[in-house]
Image (cartoon, helix red, strand yellow):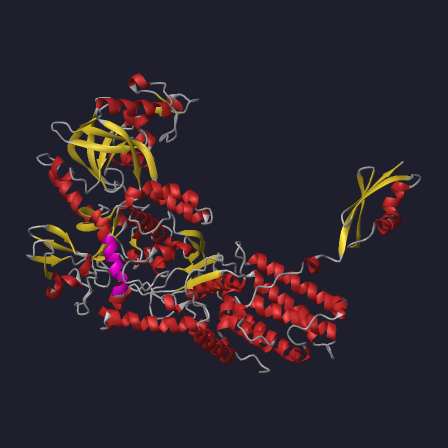
Amino acid sequence: MSEYDPATIERKWQARWAEAAAFRVAAADPGRRRFYALEMLPYPSGRIHMGHVRNYSIGDAVARFRRMRGEQVLHVIGWDAFGLPAENAAIQNGAEPRAWTLDNIDTMRAQLKRLGIGYDWSREVATCLPEYYRWNQWMFLRMLERGIAFRARRMLNWCDSCGTVLANEQVVSGRCWRCDNPVLRREFDQWFLRITDYAQELLDGIDALPAWPDRVRTMQRNWIGRSEGATVRFPVDGGDDRIEVFTTRIDTIFGATYVALAVEHPLVATLARGTAQEKAVAEFVAAESSRSVEDRFGETAAKVGVFTGRHAVNPFSGASIPIWVANFVLTDVGTGAIMSVPAHDERDFAFARTHGLPVRPVVRAADASAADAGLPFVDDGVLFDSGPYDGLASAAARARLTAIAEEKGFGARTVTFRLKDWGVSRQRYWGTPIPVVHCEKDGIVPVPDAQLPVVLPDDAPLTGVGGSPLAQLPAFVETTCPKCGGPARRETDTMDTFVDSCWYYFRYCDPHNARAPFDWAAVAPWFPVDLYIGGIEHATMHLIYTRFWTKVMRDLGLASIDEPVTQLFTQGMVIKDGAKMSKSKGNVVDPDAMIERFGADTTRLFSLFAAPPERDLEWSDAGIEGCSRFLGRLWRTFDRARAALPAPGTPPPPAAGEGGALDLRRKTHRTVRRITDDLGPRMHLNTPVAAVMELLNAVAPVAAEEPVLPGPAWALREAFETIAKVLAPFAPHVAEEIWEALGHPAFVADASWPEPDTVLLLDEDVLLVIQINGKVRGKLTVPRGLGEEAALAAARADAHVAAHLSGKTIRKSVYVPDRLLNLVAS
């Protein structure tokens, strides 16, 4: 080919890689450094998008580089194949979710192969297949045995649009993470996992993840949300009830002027009974219960409430304070009740002002009088108007008051977490069936291991309404109790699909194991994952869940690590016209169309070259066209010169070490050093492409010479071999084509990464510092390797140095070649 033909080149090399199983890894080689490169597995929506192209091109570039550096690289892909979109597509299009999903997997697999991503396809998994989700069920049962999995009735987040409950992590600003519709609060019997048992360990473990982005680590710390404080029980006037509150500011308790309960607090139903406020409370609760989470708890939501008609007693002061129901109090934060101190909390202050409640300051700045204190004063200070504790600093007061509450039995030191137990029940069809049955005699009974997997039936009626589709299948629901043999009903909730993605990359390392989720002996050499690439939107969902699941597997004896991932890399989004690409915005660029027009190498190259990988990439038609022109120019330059290139293994002639040939060799080796540095831990994947472009600029005039003499011809061959190698992680097809045309029988993907010659990295000239009697008197540019006599002569010839030597005799000289000439003169 005299012209660059990406379609022909790419089909050829994809076929050869497939035939040779070029990227297959049979087992971990104990004699080699291993590297596990992983991108977050995709949902099989039917088409890859440019975000996929960028994500997987980043991972492939690093994997290919590491492979050429001599490491044994595991680079794998699979499919996060359960989930709501498949079910919704079935409802809308009359498709069967399994067939729809597997067809989409076939399409997307072909697209990824067309991109030339170097995956070990023999390890591919799909989470919707029984051979995978069987082990979700098996691990769930092990958690049930240990009390990590449990069933409880709680107020939960409900998405009407998706028809299912959501974990707290799946509610973003009061809206569903998937469909962006408002989320409501409803009470359900649901299955949970006790992630809270691991909250402190998850928090402490963040410090052991230095190669994770600071932003992700901060997001996880904030989501786990450890708070140290005290629980205090306020007796209810005229009864035996106690309202337990959690506070981090017990030092302000003498300033509490009301207690506020969440709408869903269990005491709300009884406190107002028989009072003049009974009707008002019932109406308020009904109205607030029908409002969305966003309307109730959003930043701009009005803080409203209603008096219950009852009072509580401050256990420290004995003061009687009113009990209110307030919409801003969350059931699952703290205890669902707060002591409200308007003088020292902005939210309590705003509510008190709105409803005419007292504001009583009890803490002031250490250097201010009570009259000077602006309200609300939210900082630590010194107590006043707090009985015997006046004058105590806030920190000392917290310790003293907490101790007294413990001594008198109405409080205790307490640590709480924002993180709540993970609700894993979903009232939808397309997910892992929860492997328990409900028996009237024996209650909840686990399905025996020998009966796993509980297979998801194919014939569920999918309407999107009316609760779980599985509940409408008598053949699925009606079963026998494994314990007593009597009639029983299968659980009809399915598991949150984040369960599937918690451990999939362990399965990659032992994907065909029919006896266990995986054999740790086969998996351990690859763990922890060396590099994990995915979007930052998973920071407080998948990336917390998978850390938790790893610790549970450790405690179950399945693994022996605490953290699953060494380095996390969060790539930027692909945006167009100032917004993330989406069908709704009409700004989508189809990867297949780009590959058809420009080729896979150009599409990959642009996705890596256009922006640093951690930043958003703004799509540019001119940019991808520029990458196409570069590859075309590279091919034409190589095609013009290759007839003049010496055969492989030809030793360099003397002329390769002088003149233009030497200049080109220097440029080649400096390019290798630059790209090697950029492909290391820094992952500056856009700058290596620019470096290859610069090297081609140096190659082009030498290749255009007529004739190409032996010295330059040898330097050209070295340059083209280097370009093929360093371009292989980015544009692997054209790199293979050039490598083969240079006479190499093996894949460039299997070649060794080039090592720069340190001699050729040196500059021809150096800066020589001239000192006279210890003071710098000149800086000279001189040839590298200059001898001492020549350096002295050059110093004498410099006018500035000569002026300082005038009339003096040099008594001694100290010469550090290429760096310093120090003269002692008098």
Specify the segment rendered in magenta: 130-140
Where residue 230 appears, x then y in whole percent?
28, 30
Q: Nearer the viewer, residue 725 or 69?
A: 69
Q: Position of residue 804 (x, y in %)?
A: 87, 41
> Which is nearer the eye, 787 or 502?
787
At a point 37% along the width and 30% down the height, the residue shown is 377
Q: Is residue 136 magenta?
A: yes
Question: In the rendered view of the protein, which quadrant contains the C terminus?
Answer: top right
Residue found farthest to the top: 388
Residue 578 visible to an observer of this rendering: no
Q: How many marks?
A: 0
Q: Residue drawn at (11%, 56%), measured in percent from left and top?
A: 482
Q: Residue furthest front?
A: 31
Residue 307 shows in this picture: yes
Q: How far from the left and from the top, in percent, is residue 441?
A: 6, 51
User: Furthest-bottom residue in view?
Assistant: 1
Foreground residue among 191 and 285: 191
Magenta residues: mostly which secondary structure? Answer: helix
Q: Quadrant of residue 526?
A: bottom left
131 sits left or right of 465 in the view: right
Placement of 336 over or under 680, stated as above or below: above
Residue 503: within the magenta? no
Give the answer, above or below, for where 72 lies relative to 253. below
For this orientation, the residue located farthest to the right is 807
Against 646, residue 461 (above or below) is above
Locate residue 703: give its quadrant: bottom right
